[in-house]
Structures are given as structure tokens and as C-alpha cells.
Image (cartoon, grey):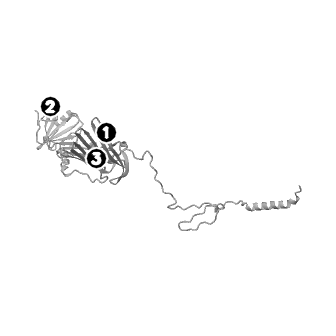
């Protein structure tokens, strides 16, 4: 085949194709700053940079209130939500600066109600507290101030001791706060109790039968979210057996958190503070570093005040010898070392004691090797056994 007639058109087509491809090629050049993303306008309206890169880049948005999605509160994990009753984790309310806790107990037997209300006030620093136990026959009151505990019973007896006692808070059952009967209570809601965020647990009525006795138990409590301490609890148990019925109900509430004013002895208990100072005021000579640590006075007793002193740290023989050789001191005179008649603490028959007098005041000192007791015998009941 003779191709010569086709060569001119073929060469022309190849030249045109080569020229067209050359015009489409992008020359290799070094990248410049124009390849950076276009800056967005500022809040003041500055004009954006107009130089565009060969390949257009997406502009960077300036942050605005709507450009960032709201932070979602994560769902609590299954281990903490919903809250569960973990009585072992409850915290001691005495970590609070101050509070008042009230425990009310009602016991109704065949329609007859017996009620007891206990109120406890507390201040952490400096430590002070009070305990009022109100029952149908009267009120027992305890006040702890200045490292002394003063108790006056409903019948007027006095008990004074140095320091304080955990028994002061026993009715409040810290930290469980009378929730031990509510171990099956279920979480129902997150709410406020007296303005404090709390979890509310409820024990729906639970019926049971024990022999021929039917029993129903129900109640609820509020647990502070911050601090994990009980704000309030309530439970009621109703039982019936034939003609016998009983309803026992306990309610405990926490109030005045951080708002308890100064705690002090009430006016009608000030005489107790004066009484504990009496041996020192009268200059009663006691051996060593022995000091008063308590007092008992019975309103309807024999008229003798019993003081307790710390251990003088000596043997009984050394104690007796100390007073045999003691000269008149601060107006006190040793009148007898030996057995004492009509003495209830074994001075009459078991061991020898000491009798002293200052004007019209007579005392008997009784030491058993551990505790020194001093009885202020106001009516003059005791006498030497010769």
C-alpha cells in the first residue's frame, strides 16, 4: 500500500496534538504562601487575603458560640447510676461544722402511744454539744462544754465527768442514722431536702408472716449527694397477732447544718459547774497530781456528794501514811484514819479511809489503789470507828 498520500495530514495531526498537550501542562514551580488557607475575617471586619492557591483549601472558621457543640453530660456508669443503698459508705455527720439531729420514736401498743424525742446539737470547733432526751415523765439533759460533760436527769440527779462520751450520739446511730432497717430501699429520685441536693430512697411496704404474726415494714430516707451523709430517715413497722397490735415508728432528721449558735450551760444548770470547782475552791489537800474528774449527786439521796479524782499513783499504805503525817492545810484538819461507820463504800469493814474537816464541812477519802473518791458529807452522817 502506498502511504505517501497520507503523510502530510498525519504529521499535521500529530503536531497539533503535541501542542495542545503542552498548553495543558502546569509548570513545576516552588510552593508559595498563597497555598496557605484563606484567613477568615476577624470580628472587626478585616478584609480576607485574596490570593488563592492552585488547589482551593477550605477556609478556617473563626470560633463562635454556635461553632462548638455543647458539652454533653455523660451518662453515669452502671456502677454509680442509679444510686444504690451502700450503708457501709455513709459518712459521719460530725465532719460537718455544726448540726442539730432529732430522733423521734413512737411505740403504739393496742392504741396506747409512748413517745420519746431526742435532740442533739453539735459544734465541731471548739467542740461542744447538747443532748435532750424528752419522755413522758420529764427531760434528761446533757451539755458538753469546756471538756466537761454535765448531765441532769429527769428526776434531778447530777452526773458530771471530765471529757465527753460517744454515748452522747448513740441515739442518732451515726453514720447509719437509723437506716439499717431499710437495706432493701430503692432509689426513686434526685431531689432537694431542705435545700440540699439529695438522693431519695424508698422502701415500699413489705409484708411478711412469722408464725401467726403478720408484719409490715416500710420507710424512706434522703442521702446528701455532696458528703454522702443521711439527711433524714423514717421507718415504720406494724405487727399484729390476734388481738395484739403494735406500731413502732422511728424518724430521724438533720437540720441547722452549719448554723448552730454557741452552746453553753443553761442558767438552771450553772450550779453544776460551780459544784465541780468546790474541792479546789476549798483547798482540799489531795496527794500528788490527783485532780477532780467527776461528781455524782442524787437529788433524793442521803445528801452526800461523791467526787471522783484521778489516781494519785501510790499504794494504799502510802496514801494512809500521807494523811497520818499531814499537818493542818488550807484550814483542813485530818480527824481520823481508819474505818468509818455507816459508809457505803466498804470503809466500815474492808479498808481504812481518811476523815477530814474544815469548819462545818466534813469529807471522807476512800482509795482502793486505783480510784480516789471523796465524799462531801453535808449532813454529818459518817463517824470514826474506834
- Mark 1 residue crowding within 10 angstroms, few (<14) / some (14–19) / many (20+): few
Q: Position of residue 375 (x, y in %)?
A: 16, 40
Q: Nearer the viewer, mark 1 or mark 3?
A: 1
Callout 2–callout 3 Cβ contact below 8 Å: no
The quadrant where residue 287 appears: top left
- Mark 3 residue crowding within 10 angstroms, few (<14) / some (14–19) / many (20+): many
The earlier-in-sequence mark between 2 and 3 is: 3
Label drawn at residue 251: 3
- Mark 2 residue crowding within 10 angstroms, few (<14) / some (14–19) / many (20+): some
Q: Out of 44 and 159, give the one closest to the viewer.
A: 44
The answer, for residue 42, to whether it is visible in the render is yes
Mark 3: secondary structure: strand
In the depicted structure, whether residue 39 falls above or below residue 335: below
Label 2, label 3: how many angstroms apart (C-alpha)?
52 Å
> Along the horizontal axis of the image, is 279 left or right of 165?
left
Q: Position of residue 332 (x, y in %)?
A: 14, 42
Mark 2: secondary structure: loop
Q: Position of residue 3 (x, y in %)?
A: 87, 57
Mark 2, residue position = 349
Callout 1–callout 3 Cβ contact below 8 Å: no
Mark 1, residue position = 208
Label drawn at residue 274: none
Q: For the point 25% across and 45% down, which residue is it?
A: 105
Q: For the point 31% across and 39% down, which residue is it?
A: 208
Label 1, label 3: how many angstroms apart (C-alpha)?
22 Å
The answer, for residue 325, to whether it is visible in the render is no
Amino acid at each position: 500500500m502506498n502511504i505517501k498520500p497520507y503523510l502530510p495530514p498525519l504529521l499535521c495531526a500529530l503536531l497539533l496534538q503535541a501542542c495542545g498537550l503542552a498548553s495543558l501542562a502546569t509548570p513545576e514551580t516552588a510552593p508559595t504562601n498563597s497555598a496557605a488557607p484563606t484567613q477568615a475575617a476577624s470580628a472587626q471586619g478585616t478584609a480576607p487575603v485574596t490570593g488563592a492557591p492552585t488547589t482551593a483549601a477550605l477556609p478556617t472558621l473563626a470560633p463562635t458560640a454556635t461553632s462548638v457543640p455543647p458539652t454533653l453530660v455523660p451518662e453515669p456508669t452502671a456502677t454509680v447510676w442509679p444510686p444504690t443503698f451502700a450503708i457501709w459508705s455513709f459518712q459521719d455527720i460530725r465532719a460537718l461544722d455544726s448540726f442539730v439531729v432529732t430522733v423521734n420514736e413512737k411505740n403504739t401498743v393496742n392504741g396506747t402511744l409512748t413517745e420519746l424525742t431526742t435532740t442533739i446539737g453539735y459544734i465541731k470547733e471548739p467542740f461542744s454539744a447538747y443532748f435532750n432526751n424528752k419522755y413522758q415523765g420529764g427531760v434528761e439533759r446533757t451539755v458538753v462544754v469546756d471538756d466537761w460533760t454535765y448531765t441532769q436527769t429527769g428526776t434531778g440527779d447530777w452526773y458530771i465527768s471530765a471529757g465527753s462520751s460517744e454515748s452522747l450520739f448513740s441515739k442518732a446511730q451515726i453514720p447509719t442514722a437509723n437506716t439499717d432497717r431499710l437495706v432493701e430501699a430503692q432509689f426513686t429520685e434526685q431531689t432537694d431536702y431542705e435545700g440540699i441536693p439529695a438522693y431519695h430512697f424508698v422502701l415500699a411496704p413489705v409484708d411478711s408472716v412469722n408464725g401467726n404474726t403478720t408484719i409490715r415494714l416500710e420507710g424512706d430516707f434522703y442521702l446528701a449527694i455532696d458528703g454522702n451523709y443521711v439527711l433524714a430517715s423514717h421507718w415504720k413497722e406494724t405487727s399484729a397477732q390476734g388481738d395484739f397490735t403494735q406500731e413502732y415508728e422511728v424518724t430521724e432528721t438533720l437540720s441547722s447544718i452549719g448554723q448552730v449558735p454557741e452552746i453553753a450551760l443553761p442558767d438552771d444548770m450553772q450550779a453544776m459547774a460551780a459544784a465541780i470547782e468546790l474541792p479546789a475552791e476549798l483547798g482540799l489537800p489531795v496527794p500528788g497530781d490527783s485532780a477532780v474528774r467527776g461528781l455524782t449527786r442524787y437529788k433524793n439521796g442521803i445528801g452526800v456528794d461523791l467526787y471522783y479524782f484521778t489516781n494519785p499513783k501510790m499504794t494504799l499504805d502510802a496514801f494512809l501514811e500521807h494523811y497520818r503525817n499531814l499537818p493542818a492545810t488550807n484550814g483542813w484538819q485530818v480527824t481520823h484514819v481508819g474505818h468509818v461507820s455507816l459508809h457505803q463504800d466498804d470503809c466500815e469493814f474492808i479498808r481504812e479511809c481518811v476523815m477530814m474537816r474544815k469548819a462545818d464541812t466534813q469529807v471522807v477519802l476512800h482509795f482502793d489503789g486505783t480510784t480516789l473518791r471523796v465524799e462531801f458529807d453535808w449532813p454529818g452522817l459518817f463517824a470514826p470507828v474506834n
